[in-house]
Amino acid sequence: MGHPVLWVGHPPKERKPYEATQRYRHYVGLQVCWPLTVCGVWETIEPGRSTLRFESPEVGEHHSVYVEIYIEEYPKLKVVDQGHRAWVEGNISRVDAGEVSLGKGAKVTLE
């Protein structure tokens, strides 16, 4: 599906301030499949559930994709190095400046 379109460019300058705050809501629900790299893993409050942080090697730092998974379903994630390549697939549930969260059911495929 390609790279995250919301990182391709910035909104036109003629946009009103309120419109600029609303532009990200149009991405919620969009299904994506992106090649990313593992940047971090940490446990959530829910037992057995972890949050993964990914970045795009093409886009660079300060643009992250977050996915919540059950770590036992992905045992290799317990031993991979930072920067390990993966494909991340799911529906966008939240977008904020430089951050995208994928909803429940997102899948991670390690290379």
Image: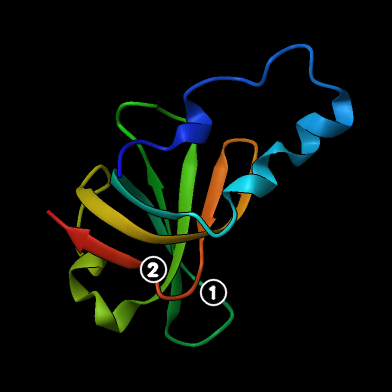
Locate residue 107, reporting x and y percent.
31, 68
- The vertical placement of 45 against 79, above or below, is below
Q: With 85 as the anchor, is 101 left or right in this view?
A: right
Please identify the residue farthest to the bottom as the structure is shown. Answer: 47
Which one is in front, 13 or 104?
13
Q: What residue would you read off at disc 2?
A: 106
Secondary structure under tag 1 reads loop
Locate residue 57, reporting x and y percent.
30, 31
Colour setup of the view = rainbow
Residue name at image x 55 percent, y 60 percent: 29
Locate residue 88, reporting x and y percent.
31, 56
Query: What amino acid is labelled 1 in the image?
Result: Thr
Q: With 72 as the anchor, is 69 left or right in this view?
A: right
- The vertical placement of 80 against 84, above or below, is below
**Which label sits in the foreground, 1 or 2?**
2
> Which class describes the residues within 10 Å of circle 1: few (<14), some (14-19), or many (20+)?
few
- Residue 62 visible in the displayed image: no
Assign the N terminus to one quadrant of the image.
top left
Q: What residue would you read off at disc 1?
A: 44
Residue name at image x 17 percent, y 58 percent: 110
Secondary structure under tag 2 reads loop
Locate residue 106, reporting x and y percent.
39, 68
Residue name at image x 12 percent, y 53 percent: 111
Count every numbered label the image shows and give the total. 2
Q: Residue 65: give its label.
A: none
Residue name at image x 57 percent, y 36 percent: 98
> Which class describes the residues within 10 Å of circle 2: few (<14), some (14-19), or many (20+)?
some
Query: What amino acid is labelled 2 in the image?
Result: Ala
Q: With 62 as the anchor, is 76 left or right in this view?
A: left
* Lower position in the chain sequence, tag 1 or tag 2: 1
C-alpha separation, residue under disc 1 versus residue under disc 2: 16 Å
